Image (cartoon, rainbow, N blue to C red):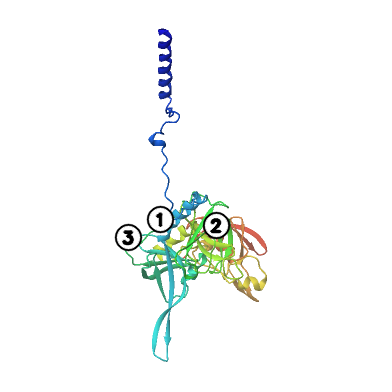
Amino acid sequence: MRHRSHARLCAFIAVAALAAASGCKERPSPGGPPPPSATKVPEAPPTASTIETMPPPVPPPSKGALIEDERNTISVFREVAPATVFVTQKRLVVDRFWGTAVEVPAGSGSGFVWDADGHVVTNFHVVDNAQSLVVRLQGEKTFPAKLVGVEPRKDIAVLKIEAPKEMLKPIQVAPLREPLEVGQKAIAIGNPFGLDHTLTTGIISAVGRPVEGVGGVTIRDMIQTDAAINPGNSGGPLLDSSGHLIGMNTMIFSKSGTSAGIGFAVPSTTIARIVPQIIKTGKAETVGLGIQLDPAHRLERRNGIRGVIVMGVIPGGPADKAGLRGLSEGDRGLVLGDVIVGVDGTPVDDYDALYNALDTKKPGDKVKVDLLRNGQKTTVEVAVELLT
């Protein structure tokens, strides 16, 4: 009997120890008072005063709030907005009746800070025929701007403002080694309709578009984007998802004059090549063959000639050394010399094509020029030179 009681006691101790080890709580005895922790205190009904002081319920966060793409767009805007400026051209209006004169805004556009020296890049058509220019930075601080130089054939202009360096945030140009891809993200910042620092997003819709510019020739390799571009966006930056400059917003294709999802930007590769030249010399470097020609193409149109007529050859120039022939006087009037019909295998139908065929060449580069001479096709090698 004693052994049985002892065995029961050991079993009870073992079960109790196992329950304690497993985290189980001891159940109250039937009919006994509940443990203090289990005692339920009745809640007082809410009164009018407590209802008024209760905070409003917080709505759950949206499932799409601040997704990765949104965070990227916000980051790019915060980084590049300080580099984007507002360019206003002013003209002097004279009131002859009262004998007064006042400057009034005559047009506006966007631009971006190029370097810490205060150079600002914008479109040529934004500053064309301006009597004075003003640049406004993001902090609403305005500075008078001086025109450094322009390249109408690329619709590029460079201005300079005297602003403290701490107020200047130069833009970062996309590395040349990274080609643009159709479908990649495009971000435009500018001042459409005079609205300060407006951001729109889209994609690169196409690359390599030839678009007729304000300078009388086609701008090659333009970027097409569906990011909304409106009047006032001209001259503003087009950016990639890294916040790097990939182009300068220049024009839209629209019958209404507002964004229709087809905008064009001058590529950053062209900007990076032209802007330093303008800063250095006040103009873009242009190479040529040492010939005289008519950019208006009047003689060619009059005679139905496809190509560029060599009007004259500059003595001692590359064309002269290569033996090119210009127009000459004959018994019955002008005698046709050489007609340029190709450069390095690329057909040349007019001055536009000739300019773009030589556009990327450097002084001293040799090109093969296809000519029509006396009705026969011939090819000569010409070393291009820098035009002064």
The local secondary structure at tag 1 comes to helix
Other-residue count near label 3 (Cα within 10 Å), few / some / many at <14 / 14–19 / ≥20: few
Relative to the observer, which residue lies in front, 270 or 321? 270
Q: Do callouts 2 and 3 mark residues in contact (Cβ within 8 Å)?
A: no
- The answer to whether one can see residue 335 in this image is no
Instruction: Please state which of the two labelled residues, at mark 2 or mark 1, is closer to the viewer.
Output: 1
The picture places residue 279, in percent across and down from the top left corner, at 40, 63
At label 1, which amino acid type do we have? Thr
Q: Quadrant of residue 95?
A: bottom left
| Mark 1–mark 3 distance (CA, rounded to whole Å) | 53 Å
Q: Residue at x 34, y 62 (%)?
A: 167
Q: Earlier in the sequence, mark 2 or mark 3?
A: 3
How many angstroms separate mark 2 from mark 3 (CA)? 32 Å
Image quarter (top left, top right, bottom left or bottom right) of the C terminus:
bottom left
Kindly identify the residue that appears in the image at 64 percent across and 62 percent down. Answer: 372
- Where does label 3 land, which residue? 166
Which numbered dot is residue 50? Answer: 1
Within-10-Å neighbours for mark 1: few <14, some 14–19, many 20+? few
Q: Quadrant location of residue 313?
A: bottom right
Q: Is residue 29 above or below residue 124?
A: above
- On the image, the x and y values in percent for residue 192 come to 49, 67
Q: Amino acid at mark 3?
A: Glu
Mark 2 → mark 1, Cα distance in angstroms: 50 Å
Q: Which mark is residue 202?
A: 2
Residue 340, label in figure: none
Residue 140 makes an appearance in the image = yes
Tags 2 and 1 touching, CB below 8 Å = no
Amino acid type for the residue under numbered disc 2: Gly
**Pointer 2 local density, CA inside 10 Å: few below 14, some 14–19, many at least 20:** some
Between residue 168 and residue 122, name the one nearer to us.
Answer: 168
Going from the N terminus, do you reach mark 2 or mark 1 first?
1
Numbered circles on residues, count = 3
